[in-house]
Amino acid sequence: MKTAAIALLTIFLICTSQAKADDALEIENAFRQYVEAAVHSDGKAAADMFSESAVDYWSRMLKDARTLSRIELEKRPVYQLFNIILIRKRIEDDSGIAEIDGRTWLQYSYSNGWNSVKALTAFYENRDVYELAPEITGESAELKTKDHGAILPSGLPFIREHGLWKIDGKRQFDQLEKNIKAKIKHSGMSKTAFIDSMYNVLFGHSIPDRLWHIKEK
């Protein structure tokens, strides 16, 4: 009886270990497909790598960009505030995107090379140097990257949806929000001043006052 129990436990551990190895490989492949799509401006393929929570997030940001007053906007968390300002800037450049949904926004933004393309291109060009190290807990995971054996501090969260591993939008945006808040605290700047400095890096000037307000139709 004891021998049978040990045998069953051994089989269970082997199967669990194999399943984790399979999941790790799927996550690594999903990330590589995402990087490939982003670097080559394949918006649809890049957008397909994100979870439903990411789609929902961007749908909310697009709605808020159309409806929030400056007073309401300034009450939003930092990362949300910055994204709403960016969406308003993109709508100015192309009014056709004003009524799109979150998934279409992801497709559009990756097709236009707006999303962390420099960092993703650096990884893509040096992909043989980096080692991917997924850390899996149940239906969620965090993909860490090793550079010459040293784990880099930032990781990319994943979640299993409908049997497939996707980039976990909610956890990703929560982490980005936390990181930006820490940077603001370290800088000693106000929230709006820090947001303005981020915008300046992208566009070479401060946020135009009109982007703080709802666009008149």
Image: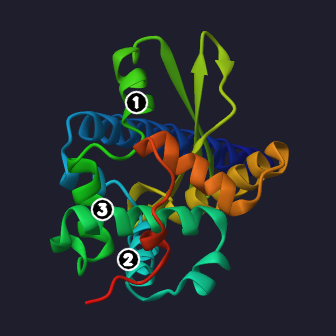
* Location of residue 78 with respect to 111 vertically, above or below: below
Locate residue 40 relative to residue 105 in the image: left or right.
Answer: left
Residue 149 position, x and y percent, is: 64, 13
Determine the secondary structure under disc 1: helix
Q: Nearer the viewer, mark 3 or mark 1?
A: 3
Disc 2/disc 1 C-alpha distance (Å): 24 Å
Q: Residue at x 28, y 77 (%)?
A: 101
Residue 155 position, x and y percent, is: 61, 40
Q: Residue at x 44, y 75 (%)?
A: 61
Residue where numbered disc 2 is placed: 62
Residue 12 position, x and y percent, is: 62, 49
Q: Nearer the viewer, mark 3 or mark 2?
A: 3
Q: Are the residues tagged 3 and 1 within 8 Å (C-beta)?
A: no
Disc 3/disc 1 C-alpha distance (Å): 19 Å
* Location of residue 198 with respect to 118 vertically, above or below: below
Disc 3/disc 2 C-alpha distance (Å): 11 Å
Determine the secondary structure under disc 3: helix
Name which residue type carries label 1: Lys
* Location of residue 21 with respect to 76 vertically, above or below: above
Q: Is residue 188 visible?
A: yes
Determine the secondary structure under disc 2: helix
Residue where numbered disc 3 is placed: 90
Q: Quadrant of residue 38?
A: top left
Residue 175 position, x and y percent, is: 66, 55
Q: Residues within 10 Å of mark 1 (few under 14, many from 20)?
A: few
Residue where numbered disc 1 is placed: 118
Q: Residues within 10 Å of mark 2 (few under 14, many from 20)?
A: many
Locate residue 129 relative to residue 40 in the image: left or right.
Answer: right
Q: Are the residues tagged 2 and 1 within 8 Å (C-beta)?
A: no
Q: Residue at x 41, y 78 (%)?
A: 65
Whichever of callouts 3 and 2 sits on the residue coming sooner in the sequence is 2
Q: Are the residues tagged 3 and 2 within 8 Å (C-beta)?
A: no
